[in-house]
Image (cartoon, rainbow, N blue to C red):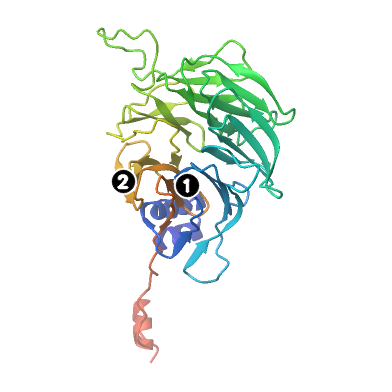
Amino acid sequence: MLGFLSARQAGVDDPLRLRRAESTRRVLSLKLNPDREVDRIHGNGINTIDIDAIEGRYMLSGGADGVIVIYDLENHSGKQQYTCRAVRTVGRSSRHVHKFSVETVQWYPYDTGMFVSSSFDKTMKVWDTETLKPAEVFEFEGNVYSHHLSPIARKHSLIAVGTKNPKIQLCDLKSGSRIHVLQGHRAEVLAVRWSPRYENILATSSADSKVNIWDVRRASGSLFTLDQHNGEKSKASSQAENTAHNGRVNGLCFTSDGLYLLTTGTDDRMRLWNSATGENTLVNYGKVCNESRKRLQLSVSHGCSPEFVFVPCGSSVAVYALHTGELITMLRGHYNNVDCCEFHPDYQELYSGGKDGNLLAWVPVVRTADVEEEPNGENERFELNGKSPPF
């Protein structure tokens, strides 16, 4: 670390190199923090969490009990040991609460005054954070598995929604109506994700084993369908269509620069794709346990070198090197299956939620101070400088 600081001070290294090195060190030292707890509010499992991108201070969680909770992640106590308090709750006593399991929650990307939730009660609600009342309610014909707002869009305010119906719905926040339908899947749509690089590019995954990439400005169908074989199917294969996995594809996540897309499926595989060409990079992550029939929320680090991917794997969170597929570590602490995890890029922390109803904070181990050996006397100080004392 002292070498990085000296090189930065002398102008030899780009300041970004020091930042990446320290971010990487912090991710590699993630441990369950005994000094930090998160209020336990949910009576059942936690399906989804989201940290706001504006301040990085507030976290949303949605549970199988239909409850939505907002947590304040800041330490206001001034003590090392503290609890992240629940500051607002849409509980079972609220007349606006979702009737069934909440599958996805997301902050509005530009303002914490609004967030969006979707549920198995066939609705998606746009909430006013201050009053905790829905400003808009979208109703669908089937269970809602996933929704997503673009983190970068300036020219549209569309929410992509994946439901039990194979058609992807595009809802407009401005008009409060469903304005477009994307057709291309043959089974329920389990995950949807906007590209963080191009505001009109959308990725969707389904129980039909397919992952489609769309340009929502086009009306003629998807740009392409990801093919796990890169167009080189075996002669014995009787498949007529491209498939990304050999099972339900229930996890989608772009890298922070939008250049790559990660997918997970119930075939116990995770794949990394070039998002521009749709090419399977053939990174081998080994067996990634995945028995979930619903959406699985994985997360990718930001600002590290190399980057890491965090994926729920049974009752643990597996940490892999993104581009090599190496299993770095398994974060163990939950008592039941983990359904969601979210990386906090500002502090290189990770939050995870599972069927045990717990939200756990994984925090970097604090670096021990680098102490230089102090010279004992004046003579030694001069000798260290290669000079003789003046007397």
Give the quarter of the image for residue 149. top right
Drawn side of residue 296 relative to residue 290, left or right: right
Q: Dot 1 corresponds to which residue?
A: 343
Q: Seen in the image, is 36 located left or right of residue 78?
A: left
Earlier in the chain: of badge 2 and badge 1, it is 2
| Residue 318: percent from left, percent from top | 34, 43
**Quadrant position of the C terminus in the picture:** bottom left
- Is residue 143 shown above or below 71? above
Residue 304 rendering spot, x and y as whole percentages = 44, 46
The percent position of residue 11, horizontal first and vertical second, equals 50, 55
Nearer to the camera, 274 or 222: 222
Residue 321, above or below 87 = above
Query: Disc 2 versus disc 1: distance between alpha carbons?
Result: 16 Å
In the rendered image, which residue does mark 2 sit on?
328
Which is in the foreground here, disc 2 or disc 1? 1
Q: Quadrant of residue 66?
A: top right
